[in-house]
Amino acid sequence: MSQASPISATKRPSPPRRMPGRRVRFAASLAVLGPGIVSGFADNDAGGITTYSLAGAKFGYDLLWVILVTQIALFVTQEIGARIGLATGQGLTGLIRERFGVRWAAFAALTMIAANLGSTVSEFAGISAALSLFGVPVAVSSALAAIAVITLISRGSFSRVQYFFVGIGVLVSAAYIVSAILAHPDWPRAANSLFIPHGTFNGAYMLAVVGTVGTTITPWGQGFIQAYVVDKRLRAEDLRAERIDVLIGVAITNVIAAFIVIAVAATLWTTGHRDIQDASAAAAALKPLAGDVASTMFAIGLLAASLLGLGVVPLASAYTACEAFGWEQGVDWRWREAPAFYGLLAFFILFAAVFLLIPGLPLIQVMFSAQVINGLLLPVILVFVMKLAGDKRLMGNLVSGRINLALGWTVTGLLVLMSVVLVVTAFSG
């Protein structure tokens, strides 16, 4: 029997080092992040910035409380949407088709796509408005933006597309934070308006409230986060990390929205410049009041936000249409593998680009109307979402509990009431 060598007897190879449990969980959480954050950044798109700019110019700090309230509602609805995606591995309209039939799926899909087309036109309008401040013609900016976004999404991997979206979102956030600080706002008044409702609740005020809600909680956002969770191949065990992702995204959405309102309120509303045509007009008007840097940062934010929205909103439309008809979808597929998905994506982008070139098109009405339409259609989509979220057979262990369902249905009921108030206000003049 051979004797073991002194080296082998006394010096054994050390076992492989393992990451501590907390570090493993932290790394896993980072891998999950994306759907909520991208949705949060994309909520502040061209239509949103225009709506917040109009609200700040017309009503000053008075609508900040709406942004705080919608933050709670947005978290509830986005968490439920992500939960459905984690539990089922399917997108929203695909589930509507299975659960309620083809007709309801077609209705939901057409509803979201109609609203999304208006939002996509808004993104092109935002890009054109921002670049026009630097002398770029509308046709040139629209063509370049359309080609760039289609190429990025159709030829990029999932992670590359996500990094692009997040990078653009960070740029938008920085631009509007700097603009608001340079505007030297009345911070105590802004803080007071954030927690206590202010203003006269007349027709114009209620229209602004619905527009603000409609640009923060959107039908496309509800479908997008669920489809994005599925496309990223997240699973039921990722629920806790995805909640953190949604919470970060919601905070981003509303904090940046508040900074936009504050920047405009501190300059245009304070000095009596309360009739502006769009966000680019707000950027130009900021120049003599807050300086060149604030004006330029506001314009850069508008451009970056519009590019982000131009990538996300048509992508949400393509997800929606493909889910409704059971076609292949996802940004990890190549064009030849998912021709319907990329064909629809290109169609939605190019249609909006051409639509923008119509002579005399009232862009401000198109952009603001798209947000109001989103506000009107959102309750319809949320009814489907809430019925799916409470289906134990469909959701399994991730079925929404009583508190979650109560919050979700409360949000849906309030949005239905808001839509009714808007219609009554419009017909009563």
Image: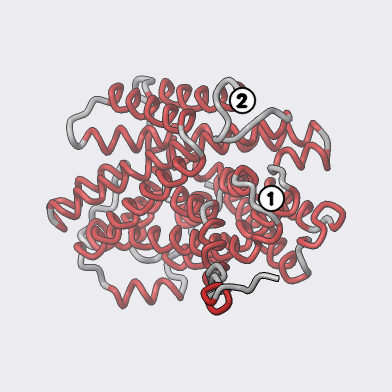
Horizontal and vertical percent for residue 40?
Answer: 48, 54
Horizontal and vertical percent for residue 369?
Answer: 48, 40
Ranked by sequence position, the earlier of labels 2 and 1 is: 1
**Which residue is more in the foreground, 171 or 151?**
151
- Say few, some or many: other residues with alpha carbon within 10 Å of mark 1 (under 14 / 14 to 19 / 20 or more): many
Horizontal and vertical percent for residue 172?
Answer: 33, 51
Task: Residue under label 1, please give it.
Answer: 85
Q: Is residue 228 visible?
A: yes
Q: As shown in the figure, which amino acid type bears the numbered disc 2?
A: Ala
Task: Residue under label 2, please give it.
Answer: 338
Rendering quarter of residue 258: bottom left
Rendering quarter of residue 56: bottom left
Q: Which mark is residue 53?
A: none
Instruction: Please report the residue visible at 48 percent of the width from the left and 44 percent of the height from the top.
Output: 159
Q: Does residue 361 appear left or right of residue 101 in this picture?
A: left
Q: Is residue 203 visible?
A: no
User: Is residue 65 depicted above or below 297 in this figure?
Assistant: below
Nearer to us of marks 2 and 1 is 2
**Which residue is more in the foreground, 339 or 187?**
339
User: Is residue 322 depicted above or below 410 in this figure?
Assistant: above
User: Is residue 45 depicted above or below 30 in this figure?
Assistant: above
**Which residue is more in the foreground, 102 or 114?**
102
Horizontal and vertical percent for residue 226?
Answer: 64, 48
Local SS, label 1: helix
Local SS, label 2: loop
What colour scheme does the image use?
secondary structure
- Say few, some or many: other residues with alpha carbon within 10 Å of mark 2 (under 14 / 14 to 19 / 20 or more): some
Task: Check the picture and name the quadrant holding the N terminus.
Answer: bottom right
Rendering quarter of residue 377: top right
Q: As shown in the figure, which amino acid type bears the numbered disc 1?
A: Gly
Instruction: Please report the residue visible at 56 percent of the width from the left and 38 percent of the height from the top.
Output: 316
**Which residue is more in the foreground, 290 or 164?**
164
